[in-house]
Image: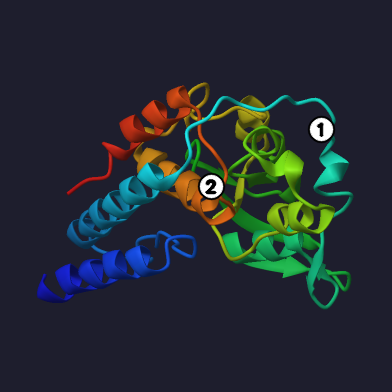
Amino acid sequence: MIFLRRAVQVAVLTLVALPIAAVVAAPPAGATPRKRSQVEAGAGALARRMLVQLKVARPLSLRGYSHRRFQPRWAHHKGACDAREVVLSRDGRRVRRNAACHPVKGLWYSPYDGKWLKSEKQVDVDHVVPLAYAWRSGARTWSQARRRAFANDLTRPELITVSHSANIAKGGQGPQSWRPPRRAYWCRYATSWITVKHHYRLSVTRRERVALLNMLRTCRG
């Protein structure tokens, strides 16, 4: 407990000193329910601090948007592996890849809806903050290089493996219009969304901010 409280205090001080570089940590794999609850509570507190720092503004026009303005194709990160293939390998279990790095076998869990999926054809790599939504939050003014970096970011919690059905249902919507069907994931979803927007200095709408605060209430303490 003392170590955990001290870790959270250090994280808060780091956030104050480096407000744009903060990343909300996920609970470690295999953590006990009590520790997971404590980590979620700390992550929620940090996310609220970051959310306060985000500019509240009306959404910009979608005019001029195209998926290709962000991602004409997935960027390569490790040899023959592109960002999508890296995420599928990272998020899956017992993933087997062919010579071109494409997953041909594995098991994936979709945290949005709690589904276990045995085929790569059943999963998608979701942009937590959708590209179209980022465009309306300020990315329309970015350079092509910055938009491409955003679409292929493996450092922030922007890319995650989910079921194809959940990804289609979400589309380009924000948290005021769509939330993961699995309520247990709301805390993680909200903290991830805020972390990405905070790092890239993207704005939020008033309704979006309210929806995020409501989801952060599920971060158990």
Give the tally of numbered discs: 2
* Crowd rating for badge 2 (residues with CA inside 10 Å; few <14, some 14–19, many 20+): many
Q: Which one is in front, 48 or 103?
A: 48
Q: Position of residue 39 (x, y in %)?
A: 26, 59
Q: Which one is in front, 108 or 191?
A: 191
**Residue beneath label 2, please?**
197
How was the colour assigned to the protein in this rendering? rainbow
Disc 1 to disc 2, C-alpha distance: 18 Å
* Crowd rating for badge 1 (residues with CA inside 10 Å; few <14, some 14–19, many 20+): some
Residue at left offset 49%, top offset 65%: 21
Q: Is residue 60 above or below residue 158?
A: above
**SS label for mark 1:** loop
Mark number displayed over residue 105: none
In which image quadrant can residue 66 be found?
top right
Residue type (three-letter) at the residue carrying disc 1: Tyr
- Side of 205 relative to 60 (left or right): left
- Side of 39 relative to 117 (left or right): left
In which image quadrant can residue 128 be found?
top right
Q: Is residue 215 above or below residue 86?
A: above
Q: Position of residue 157 (x, y in %)?
A: 54, 56
- Side of 107 relative to 22 (left or right): right
Q: Position of residue 96 (x, y in %)?
A: 72, 68
**SS label for mark 2:** helix
> Which circle's residue, 1 or 2, is located before the other in the chain?
1
Residue at left offset 32%, top offset 39%: 216
**Residue beneath label 1, please?**
65
Residue at left offset 52%, top offset 21%: 177
